[in-house]
Image (tube, helix red, strand yellow):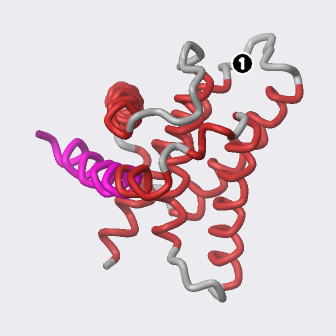
Amino acid sequence: MSQTSLEYTNVINVCRELFSKKTKDYGTAWRILRPSSLTDQIFIKAQRIRTIQETGINKVGESIDDEFIAIINYCIMALIQITERELKELEIEPTLAVSLYDKYSKEAFDLMMKKNHDYGEAWRDMRVSSLTDLILMKILRVKQIEDNNGSTIISEGIDANYFDMLNYSVFAMIHLLKQK
């Protein structure tokens, strides 16, 4: 397994474990959220990261790592909400929730591997602050698409933006873990 595959998988495993534990604690209460609400949750997390990066002050105490993990998990929740339309129940079995988590994290991984090949691992030379800005830009794009009732003329859809935000967050986590 390549270095990137291993690092990516390690980050996703941390996120998956947290998702699984929270699903056992809270059930799938997140299923009540509309995709736009999940977009706003991702925005809140990314904006907090940017504020801490710019000011160097963290008054809440949760780490930037925790916020990137939250973005990854919210992106997967959003992908489930927009893609799994036949699932009508708010409460789904934890095993199904984790299975869907695995499905979308695998799709994100496969997309990352394709893009990573074509872009020559350019993300390795990027700053975490740039990855944060890209996430914020993608959020603004998603909000605009949502405001346009999901329609685009030439651009990628909402799902592509969630996948990109997820992958940017994994890249940021890989950078942050190397700094420790």
Res 131 quadrant in image: bottom right
Q: Please give left or right for residue 61 compared with residue 52 in the image.
A: left
Res 137 quadrant in image: top right
The secondary structure making up most of the magenta span is helix
Within 10 angstroms of label 1, few (less than 14), some, or many (20 or more) residues?
few
- Is residue 151 among what the camera can see? yes
- Is residue 116 among what the camera can see? no
| Residue at point 46%, 33% (across, down) | 92
Q: Please give left or right for residue 124 compared with residue 54 in the image.
A: left
| Residue at point 56%, 85% (across, down) | 61
Tell whether position 21 is magenta: no
| Residue at point 52%, 33% (across, down) | 163
Which residue does the numbered mark 1 point to in the structure image? Answer: 155
Residue lying farthest to the left in this orientation? 1
Res 81 quadrant in image: top right
72 or 173: nearer the viewer? 72
Q: Please give left or right for residue 153 compared with residue 72 in the image.
A: right
65 or 172: nearer the viewer? 65
109 or 2: nearer the viewer? 109
The local secondary structure at tag 1 comes to loop
Q: Position of residue 86 (x, y in %)?
A: 56, 13
96 or 127: nearer the viewer? 96
Residue lying farthest to the right in this orientation? 147
Q: Is residue 168 above or below residue 160?
A: below
Q: Position of residue 104 (x, y in %)?
A: 41, 30
Q: Is residue 60 above or below residue 28?
A: below
Q: Amino acid at mark 1?
A: Ser
**Quarter of the rendering occupied by the C terminus:** bottom left
| Residue at point 19%, 48% (across, down) | 6
Q: Please give left or right for residue 24 compared with residue 2 in the image.
A: right
Segment colored magenta = 1-19
**Quarter of the rendering occupied by the N terminus:** top left
